[in-house]
Image (tube, grey):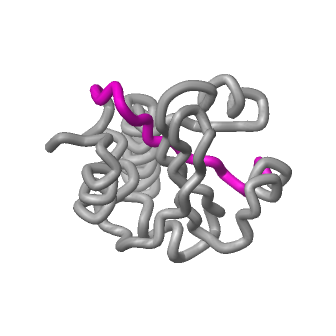
């Protein structure tokens, strides 16, 4: 009787994990070699280039998600991410060889600026404000 109960509990927890994953939608735009040019053709884009296995990338991930959520309704800037384990060619093209690397693409990529600041959501917001892309 105990093994059956343990199995039911495990299945219940597994179902909860899957349901949570299905309900979660990120406000960070995912960029690939297929959509990069089109997605970044106009406007301003704050893009994180990362590796899923990188500890510094993992540590920064929650702040990047918070930034994506906080800016989801902004028209001046889109917060995006490129997984360099899947998009090595794209990352190489932009000279990304350290992780995470955050680049600001201004005016459809006419100007590309590397972000050098802190890794918390407040740091990102202050940088975007200093670039005239966020008011609050």
When asked about the image quadrant of residue 94, the answer is bottom right
| Quarter occupied by the C terminus | top left
Image height check: is 81 above or below 43? below
When asked about the image quadrant of residue 134, the answer is top left
Q: Residue furthest right?
A: 89
Q: Is residue 87 visible?
A: yes
Residue at (43, 59) in percent of width and height: 61
Residue at (45, 56) in percent of width and height: 3
Residue at (58, 32) in percent of width and height: 108
Image height check: is 79 above or below 113? above
Image height check: is 119 above or below 107? below
Q: Residue furthest front?
A: 110
The location of residue 2, given as percent across then percent down, is 38, 58
Q: Which residues are magenta?
A: 73-87
The location of residue 82, given as percent across then percent down, is 63, 48
In magenta segment, residue 85: yes
């Amino acid at each position: 009787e105990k093994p059956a109960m343990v199995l039911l509990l495990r299945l219940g927890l597994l179902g909860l994990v899957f349901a949570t994953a299905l309900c979660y939608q990120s406000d960070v735009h995912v960029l690939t070699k297929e959509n990069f040019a089109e997605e970044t053709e106009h406007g301003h884009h704050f893009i994180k280039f990362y590796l899923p296995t990188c500890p510094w990338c993992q540590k920064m991930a929650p702040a990047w998600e918070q930034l994506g959520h906080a800016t989801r309704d902004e028209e001046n800037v889109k917060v995006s991410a490129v997984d360099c384990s899947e998009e090595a060619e794209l990352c190489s093209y932009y000279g990304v060889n350290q992780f995470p690397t955050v680049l600001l693409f201004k005016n459809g990529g006419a100007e590309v600026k590397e972000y050098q600041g802190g890794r918390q959501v407040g740091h990102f917001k202050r940088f975007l404000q200093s670039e005239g892309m966020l008011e609050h």
